[in-house]
Structures are given as C-alpha cells and as structure tokens.
Amino acid sequence: MIFLIFTSEGLLEAAPEIQTEKASVWLNPDLKNHIELPNLAAAGCDYYFLPEHADPASEKSVINALSHVEKNSRDNEIYVEYL
C-alpha cells in the first residue's frame, strides 16, 4: 500500500493509518522537515519525495505525481490525497 500526500494537513491525517499499515508514502518535497517523518521511520514506514512540487488543487499536477509514483513503485494500491 502506498500513500501519495501533498500537504502537511494530509500527512497529519493519514499518519496513523500509514503507520498501522506499515505503508510507503510519497510526499511533496516541501514536507522534508515535517514533524511526522521521524514517527513514520520509527514505525518502519518508507517515505520518498516527489522530484518537484505537485499542486493538489491541479488535476494535471496530481496525475503527473501519480504517474511518477506508479513508475517508481511495484505496488499498484495507491491512496491519493485529494482536496
């Protein structure tokens, strides 16, 4: 299971489920210093950063980010944060 998260609020909301599922998560690069990342690492969750910022309000940007995650992951069960 993979989560694609774009915002700090989305990460805070999804973090408990990510940790429970021991899921991987792809994040916008501006979340590199997010308070939740050490907790994810301690729970054994892998996290990765998108190569560029994805605007969650832009369908095209979300589709591009999802395409990147699909190309770089083996798991095809992906949960996407939508605004």
Image (cartoon, helix red, strand yellow):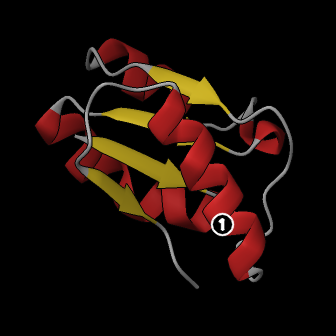
Q: Position of residue 2 (x, y in %)?
A: 33, 41
Give the labeled residue for mark 1. Answer: 62
Q: Position of residue 19 (x, y in %)?
A: 24, 36
Left or right: 74 as drawn, with respect to 73: left
* The C terminus sits in image quarter: bottom right
Q: Position of residue 38 (x, y in %)?
A: 50, 21
Q: What residue is drawn where x is 54% and y is 54%? A: 5
Left or right: 40 as drawn, with respect to 69: left
Left or right: 63 as drawn, with respect to 81: right
Q: What residue is drawn where x is 62% and y is 65%? A: 63
Left or right: 76 as drawn, with respect to 82: left
Q: Is residue 20 above or below residue 56?
A: above
* The N terminus sits in image quarter: top left
Q: Helix, strand, or loop for circle 1?
A: helix
Residue 44, quarter of picture: top left
Q: Residue furthest left?
A: 20
Q: Is residue 75 above or below residue 80?
A: above
Q: What residue is drawn where x is 66% and y is 66%? A: 62
Residue 27, quarter of picture: top right
Note whether residue 7 is visible: no
